[in-house]
Image (spheres, coloured by chain):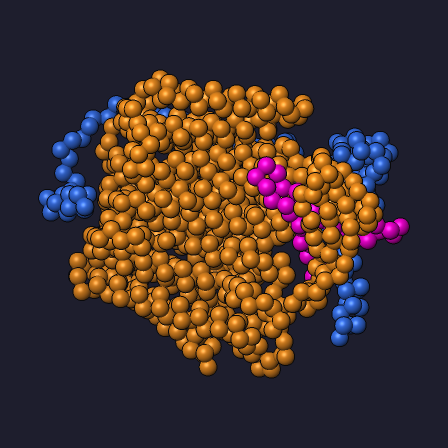
Amino acid sequence: MRRLAFLLWLVLAAPALALDPSEMLADPELEARARALDHDIRCVKCQSEVVASSNADWAKDARRQIRELISDGASDAEVKQWFLDRYGEFVLMNPPKSGSTLALWLAGPAMLLTALLLGGAYIRRRAHAEDPAGDTALSEAEEARLREILKD
Amino acid sequence: MVTEFGHFALVLAFCVAIIQMVVPMWGAYRRDARLMAVAEPAATLQFVLTALAFGALTYAFVTSDFSLRLVVLNSHSAKPMLYKISGTWGNHEGSMLLWVLIVTLFGAMAAWFGGNLPPTLRARVLSVQSAIGVAFFAFILFTSNPFLRLAVPPFDGQDLNPLLQDPGLAFHPPFLYLGYVGLSMAFSFAVAALIEGRVDAAWGRWVRPWTLAAWVFLTIGIALGSWWAYYELGWGGFWFWDPVENASFMPWLLAAALLHSAIVVEKREVLKSWTILLAILAFGFSLTGTFIVRSGLLTSVHAFANDPERGVFILAILAFFTGGALTLFSIRASAMEAKGVFSVVSRESALVANNILLAVSCFVVFVGTMWPLVAEMLFDRKLSVGAPFFDAAFPPFMLILGIILPVGAMLPWKRARLGRAVHSLRFAFVLALAIAGLVWAMQSGRSLLGPVGVFLAAWIVAGAAVDLWSRTGRGGSVARLFRLPRADWGRAVAHGGLGLTMLGICGLTAWQTEDIRVAQIGVPFEVGGYEFTLSDVRRAQGPNYLATQGVVDVRKNGRQVSVLTPEKRVYPVAQMPTTEAAIDYNLARDVYVVIGDPQQDGGWAVRVYIKPLTNWIWIGCGLMSLGGLLSLSDRRFRVAAGARKPRAGAVPAE
């Protein structure tokens, strides 16, 4: 049983842990750029993970590819373009600010503006409203009940 | 036998739920007290029956009854007891049973503590709550029955996903569900009020404790989940903007907005229809969250039942409840007449601003989460919306919120003078600015994020302190400070907690150091002022896993700080590896060490992170929850919730 456990340990204990030192570039500046890019490229084989954190083989290959391109003098934009050309927009974690995606980027500010206008109008209305004192929304019995509750 | 008993209890609970859904609603319509009175015992009975069913399932897990399909798929006889128990809800069917158990629990509590509600309102609330129960009972019984047997039981099970075998994650789902489902109470109150056609101050007071409790549970649940991700996933991330995380975050944001707007309803009788709408939407987002996790519609690391049939069922539930409630809202909202009058500068306006910021930030998260679907359906573009989008689009709202929060909290109701609030906060502002300036000068030309985070934290915490002190009146004293209502303390503590969470997030993001290298055994290396030595790598065996364990000696200026033992585990039954980071926790920073693979030419891959201020993220969440609980234990809620004698334990939903 112990032998079996040891064999199992040898076989199964091999899985890689995201970025491995052997993958890294020697130049710390280039490596830093590559690490940043690792967070912008999505692992297309995984579920909503970036290649920086994924253990999948595809992510490993992608990390290697990023480093190869950078070593060959590619700019960050060129690296992203390389992936974009081959895997489509799905591979970029940050949707481009163009075309229909512009709507995504503008949705927040537009909504804030709308909400501010509506909220502002509401507040102005309340500020100029008549104070409806003496309104009889509650019946007498209810008033008594409310008083009793609030008194406690 | 126990299993069949549990199954039977579940079917019976379903029947009781149907009765509780129909009879009291009819009774409230007919003003028939006898019919309305059905609701109370039915709610209790429903809860007891569901608890028995849940107990039966737990029993099957604890005794490793491998004739049950669910137990075979998610358990193993060698699993530690804690995870046998938590395995009950660590899967789709069991978690749905937990969900519906909590629905009935909240319903029962509304019955027990709702003595003060007008009878028709109470009957309608319980009826709506039971309708939610009916939908989920049907969902469980018809699509996800946990009590299915196997004709030929195997000798052992297939084990629980090892990532879930962790104390943090054992309690993450129950808290999250308590939060999600807690919002169903606010929803039931909102729908009942729409049917009644009346929303007044008392309604605001009744609905607030439930919202507050739900929000507290959501806060704890989300914090547990993010803490778990931090120490378990092996690179110390705490939030990934994953669709499922967003699904829990959206109800949290709306619940936060709701519990603030309910104050306005209670104190001033304005913002009524908006509050009703928020209550409907908050629960709608809870259902959306359930839908996202269980339909596989959006790809997520969390998805655990990618079954279109179930997805359609939950979508139908979602459409029925939110759609129905919103239709009702559109018909009845005009009946909610605002009463209070307030000037432009007032606490009411500040709370409107709070609601705008929280609701719009929730909208941003929603749009970002759903955009891949929209883009694919409308524009035929398959794209991803990941962390970079949310990191750019979400924080500005929190920044504005953080800046106006201390001022807003100081403003009195009805009519305020801005100059006065700003005047009493001037020291807090100068203090925050000074600390942030100091931090800015000390860091070597990096981003603005760190100093901004420090400024916000100091400003909010100092602002909360000033707010609390100002409540003691002119020439306040410490003794008077402790006699303040607990709601005042709750507000200050929760706001301070928010500030500290912001501090942790900004500090970690701005100042973390990462180092990945090959470490030779016995050869020291330096990261961020600490000296690390991998002194040994050994084999270890756990109850149901095998591990490679590194021993890392951490020193600073020659003095030993800690000996860390990061592990790489393999669970043979589940055939899955996990990394167990070793962390030296500290308020100023965490030292985070992960061991990787052996290298070809000797040595081991080792990752070291220095993560400044990280723990403040969760300390802040803890304080937010504590603030919520303090507020919940305030006298007026104990009274409003129906406990006439102020007993300590009589707080609803604690």
Q: Nearer the viewer, residue A78 or B561?
A: B561
Q: Position of residue B342 (x, y in %)?
A: 27, 26
Q: Position of residue B425 (x, y in %)?
A: 40, 22
The residue most toward the left is A140
Q: Position of residue B552 (x, y in %)?
A: 73, 49
In the picture provided, is A124 more to the left or to the right than B617? left
Q: Is residue B150 above or below residue B580?
A: below
In the picture provided, is B613 more to the left or to the right than B599? left
Name the residue at 51% across, 48% down: B222
Residue range of the region highlighted in magenta in the rendering: B576-603
Q: Nearer the viewer, residue B290 or B538?
A: B538
The residue most toward the front is B559
Q: Nearer the viewer, residue B438 or B553?
A: B553
Name the residue at 27% across, 39% down: B266
In the picture provided, is B277 more to the left or to the right than B597? left
Q: Is residue B245 visible?
A: yes
Q: Which chain is blue?
A: A
User: What main secondary structure does the magenta stretch of the protein show?
Assistant: strand
Asked whether residue B596 is drawn in magenta, I would say: yes
Q: Which chain is orange?
A: B
Count numbered badges in the picture. 0
Q: Is residue B308 above or below residue B488?
A: below
Asked whether residue B309 is drawn in magenta, I would say: no
The residue most toward the right is B601
Name the residue at 55% across, 30% down: B453
Q: Position of residue B151 (x, y in %)?
A: 57, 82
Q: Is residue B295 visible?
A: no
